[in-house]
Image: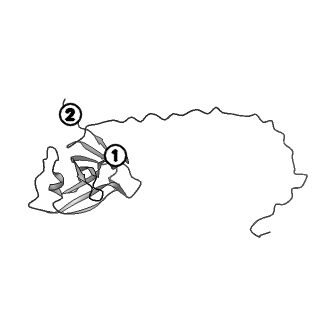
């Protein structure tokens, strides 16, 4: 026998005890658990509303990036500040630094600058992109809207609108 296994010592008859127990069958009825229905809430959000950065278990968010403008192109077109339309063509004409948004932004609130549909250069598919006013001068937070909502990296506080 290998040295790795210890042999059990025989138990002397003086230490053996006989125990008699009565056993009852304890059968529990299985409860059928039905999950609560998923309630989808449709909210109207847009330029001027507030976005709240959600949670991540990583050091950075997967679907949120921060861009800091480093050089302004004098020929950059203006964008519609009331709707946010044209923001991409205005902000991203020039030079900028980009990075994934660090996890230290969890729980922070930012004003929505606008939402646009852009073509993904790799897939050719439409992407809903949201821009948030960054907390650093000349910065914007780029949100891959559909994925960020799906992974709970972002939520919203819609503004009260007059009807």
Q: Which residue is mark 2?
A: 161
Q: Is residue 39 left or right of residue 43?
A: right
By secondary structure, the bulk of the magenta-drawn segment is best described as loop
Q: Nearer the viewer, residue 43 or 103?
A: 43
Q: Residue furthest front?
A: 124
Q: Which residues are magenta?
A: 29-47
Tell me the crowding category of disc 2: few under 14, some 14 to 19, or many 20 or more residues within 10 angstroms, Cα based. Answer: few
Q: CA distance from mark 1 to mark 2?
A: 22 Å
Q: Secondary structure at mark 2?
A: loop
Residue 123 falls left or right of residue 28:
left
Q: Quadrant of the C terminus?
A: top left
Would residue 132 be visible to someone looking at this image?
no
| Residue 46 is covered by the magenta coloring | yes
Q: Position of residue 126 (x, y in %)?
A: 27, 50
Q: What x and y, as percent, mark residue 45?
A: 25, 40
Residue 119 visible in the snapshot: yes
Residue 120 position (above or below residue 160): below
Between discs 1 and 2, the one toward the N terminus: 1
Residue 129 lies left or right of residue 89; in this view the side is: right
Farthest bottom residue? 3
Q: Quadrant of residue 140 in the image?
A: bottom left
Q: Which of the pair 75/67 is nearer the observer?
A: 75
Total number of numbered discs in the rendering: 2
Q: Which residue is mark 1?
A: 149
Q: At 87% across and 50% down in the image, what residue appears?
A: 16
Labelled disc at residue 126? none
User: What residue lies at 89% left-to-right and 55% top-to-bottom?
Assistant: 12
């Amino acid at each position: 026998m290998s040295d790795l296994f210890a042999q059990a010592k025989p138990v002397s008859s003086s230490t053996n005890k006989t125990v008699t127990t009565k056993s009852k069958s304890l059968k529990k009825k299985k409860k059928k658990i039905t999950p609560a229905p998923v309630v989808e809430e449709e909210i109207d959000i847009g330029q001027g509303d507030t976005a709240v950065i959600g949670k991540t278990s990583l050091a950075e968010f997967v679907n949120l990036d921060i861009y800091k403008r480093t050089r302004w192109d004098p020929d950059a077109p203006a964008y519609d500040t009331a709707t946010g339309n044209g923001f991409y063509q205005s902000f991203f004409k020039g030079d900028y630094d980009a990075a994934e948004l660090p996890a230290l932004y969890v729980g922070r609130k930012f004003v929505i600058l606008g939402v646009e549909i852009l073509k993904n250069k790799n897939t050719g598919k439409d992407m809903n992109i949201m821009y948030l006013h960054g907390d650093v001068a000349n910065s914007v937070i780029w949100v891959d809207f559909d994925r960020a909502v799906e992974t709970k990296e972002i939520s919203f506080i819609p503004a009260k609108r007059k009807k």
